[in-house]
Amino acid sequence: MGKQLRQQRRGKGGAVYRNPGHRQLGSIRYPNVDAGNGKIVDLIHAPGRSSPLAKIDFSGESVLMLAAEGMMVGKTVSYDLGATDLSPGNVVPLSTVPEGSFVYNIEGQPGDGGKFVRVAGASATVVSRGDKVVVLMPSGSFKTFDPRCRASLGVVAGGGQKEKPFGKAGNKYHAYRSKAKANFKVKGVAMNAVNHPHGGGGHPHVGKPSTVSRNAAPGRKVGRLSPKRRK
């Protein structure tokens, strides 16, 4: 008798595949506060995030923002749409950032709170300014933004964390579990035929076309789902 397939178990959900949202600190976006300076009160760890967060006090209102390398408790962060201070962590529009400067947490549209370059150790480089601001992304591609889009100056803190080995399986299990990810994955071709459509055979091979229809049954939806012909 066949067994329950992995993709079917994942589709049913449950505690194994559920994101522990009760541990998250909410969506980290640029606050809707008046322009001014804020004081860094604390640097905290956020479960499920690779970078630390900075707790900043803006005139009695505490907000959380992605921390930049060089941030320290007690320092001041500028939040001014006309500011020219290039200290790490300051929030400015892209139109005021000099070419060659590092930025992170860039807005895709003015006012959306930040969408791009948010992972630990990441940064983008402002290449040119004009009607559109051209930014060199961490992937190596060039992307254009509205000059009114806000961004933080500097590099996201927490870089180099992947250079440290996990050391044991338990550390990797807990690290991936905080992001609702599986810390390991067994290939389908390495399974038995009862466990996966790609399993079985004298040696690891699919044994049949790995393309499946978009209307296939749930137990058959493995491999390449309704691929398009390459031109």
Image (tube, rainbow, N blue to C red):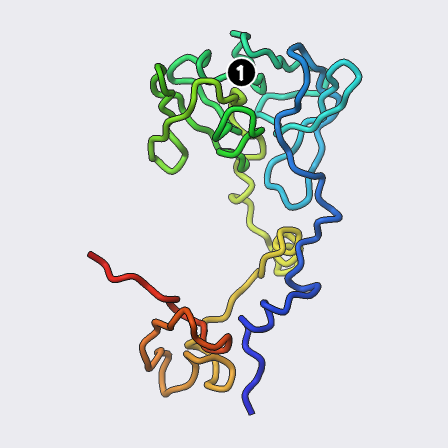
The residue indicated by pointer 1 is 92
Q: Point out residue 202 in the picture as x, y percentages from the top left corner.
A: 36, 87
Q: Residue at x 65, y 56 (%)?
A: 177
Q: How many numbered markers are drawn?
A: 1
Q: Is residue 191 above or below residue 27?
A: below
Q: Is residue 55 above or below residue 8?
A: above
Report whether 4 appears left or right of 39: left
**Crowd tier of the residue under label 1, counting other residues whose Cα lies within 10 Å: few below 14, some 14–19, many 20 or above:** many
Please provide percent x and percent y for residue 148.
48, 18
Q: Quadrant of the C terminus?
A: bottom left
Which residue extends farthest right? 60
Residue at the farthest bottom position:
1
Give the quadrant of residue 230. Answer: bottom left
Three-letter amino acid code at the position of disc 1: Val
Tell which residue pokes out farthest to the left in this image: 231
Residue 107 in the image, given as x and y percentages of width and height: 51, 28
Residue at 55 percent across and 45 percent down: it is: 164
- Residue 209 pos. (x, y %): 31, 77
